Image: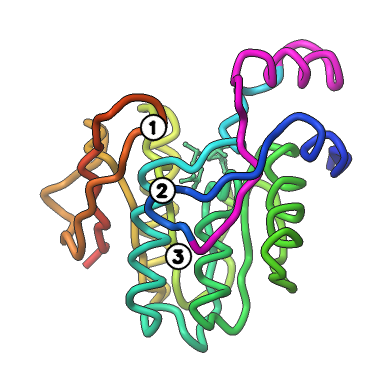
Amino acid sequence: MRTVPARFVRDHTRVQRPSAVPEVRLHVADDVVALWEAMEAEGGAGEAPPFWAAAWPGGQALARHVLDRPATVAGQVVLDLGAGSGLVALAAARAGAARVVASDVDPYSRTAVAVNAGLNGVAGIEVVGDVLGGDPPEVDVVLAGDVCYDREMTERVLPFLDRARARGAEVYVGDPGRPYLPHARLVAVSTLDVPETEGPGVRRTTVWRLP
Ligand SMILES: C[S@@+](CC[C@H](N)C(=O)[O-])C[C@H]1O[C@@H](n2cnc3c(N)ncnc32)[C@H](O)[C@@H]1O
């Protein structure tokens, strides 16, 4: 598995508090295009966009949900699926999860999760790669922030979440109204207007539970 040096994350980002989760600090991109170019210079052409260098609305709503309702994860083993920056994993750890596993296919994300954990003084988050193809890991709670961002990803994620639920895990998805999510078979548990990163607007974002 490829490893990205921590210095890359520190050198090409700035530290910011997500507007809906100000108790967490994250390394985020100032200029996404410049960051993406730096990634390609470091790793070669074909790098995925720097999803890891932003706090996505679904992740912010899910992190807020968990911090405001710590019983959701307290004492539990938690998987942050599609961790990106690790915002949701950090919120779960702060809310008292017994163990937190953060999964992301992107090596930049896996380094960013570790760097952001250090920045927030959070120890012990286990960082893993792609888990979608196999049996879900043995966890009590799956938290998935903004993972249904395109049709292809949604088609991979939903069967995984169903398998995790069938094995007894509680499954929560934070989503800002993307069209791919099968709303009819989900239960809304909280809603949050997440301020847009750029501009004065907000994204109405829902935390859904798989019944
Ligand atoms: C839109 S970002 C959301 C990041 C974070 N959860 C948040 O809300 O800020 C989606 C993340 O899913 C990750 N991802 C894509 N395919 C994946 C897979 N097969 N397994 C785990 N993560 C994956 C991407 O690399 C990206 O970091």
Numbered circle sitting on residue 19: 2
CA gap between label 3 and label 1 equals 17 Å
Q: In this view, does 204 lie to the left or right of 129?
A: left
The answer to which image quadrant residue 15 occupies is top right
**Label 3 vs 2, first from the N-terminus:** 2
Residue at figure coordinates x 70%, y 33% from the top left: 13
Q: Quadrant of the N terminus?
A: top right
Q: Is residue 24 left or right of residue 117?
A: left
Location of residue 77 with respect to 144 vertically, above or below: below
Q: Is residue 137 magenta?
A: no
Q: Is mark 1 within 8 Å of ligand 1?
A: yes
Numbered circle sitting on residue 149: 1
CA gap between label 3 and label 2 equals 23 Å
Q: In this view, does 94 lie to the left or right of 206?
A: right
Residue at figure coordinates x 43%, y 42% from the top left: 147
Identify the residue under disc 3.
Answer: 142
Q: Does the magenta stretch include residue 42?
A: yes
Measured from the top left, where is residue 61 in percent x and y? 34, 54
Residue at figure coordinates x 76%, y 21% from the top left: 39
Q: Which amino acid does label 2 sit on?
A: Ser
